[in-house]
Amino acid sequence: MGELIVESYRNSTVNAILEDIGREYKIDTKRDHLQVDSPVEEIKFKYRTYGECVRMLYRKAGVA
């Protein structure tokens, strides 16, 4: 199992958050980027897998 993600973001976008997670946790996030980026007012990941983070982001942005 991969490293669990513990991060929080405010006033960002889905793709910017994915890029930051990719840099911080050495994960290739390119395939999960949205073609049309969506804003995210606030989101917190507390010991989540990368897959859980992606699902939470998509839900928050209204695309899942």
Image: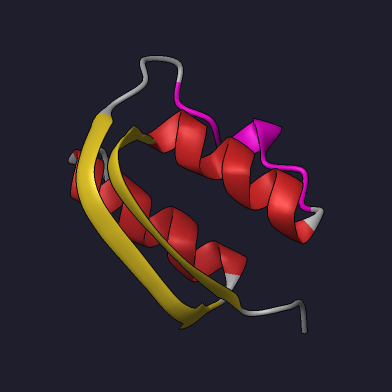
The relative height of residue 1 versus residue 28 in the rendered view (above or below) is below
Q: Is residue 43 left or right of residue 49?
A: left
Q: Which residues are magenta?
A: 27-34
Q: Residue at x 48, y 42 (%)?
A: 17
* Residue 10 location (% of width, % of height): 27, 47
Q: Is residue 51 left or right of residue 46?
A: right
The relative height of residue 1 versus residue 21 in the rendered view (above or below) is below
* Residue 44 location (% of width, % of height): 33, 67
Q: Is residue 32 magenta?
A: yes
* Residue 14 location (% of width, % of height): 39, 36
Q: Is residue 48 left or right of residue 22?
A: left
Q: Residue at x 49, y 32 (%)?
A: 16
Q: Residue furthest top?
A: 36
Indicate how the structure is coloured in the image: secondary structure
Near-viewer residue (53 or 19)? 19
Q: Is residue 42 magenta?
A: no
Q: Residue at x 28, y 58 (%)?
A: 43
* Residue 13 location (% of width, % of height): 35, 32
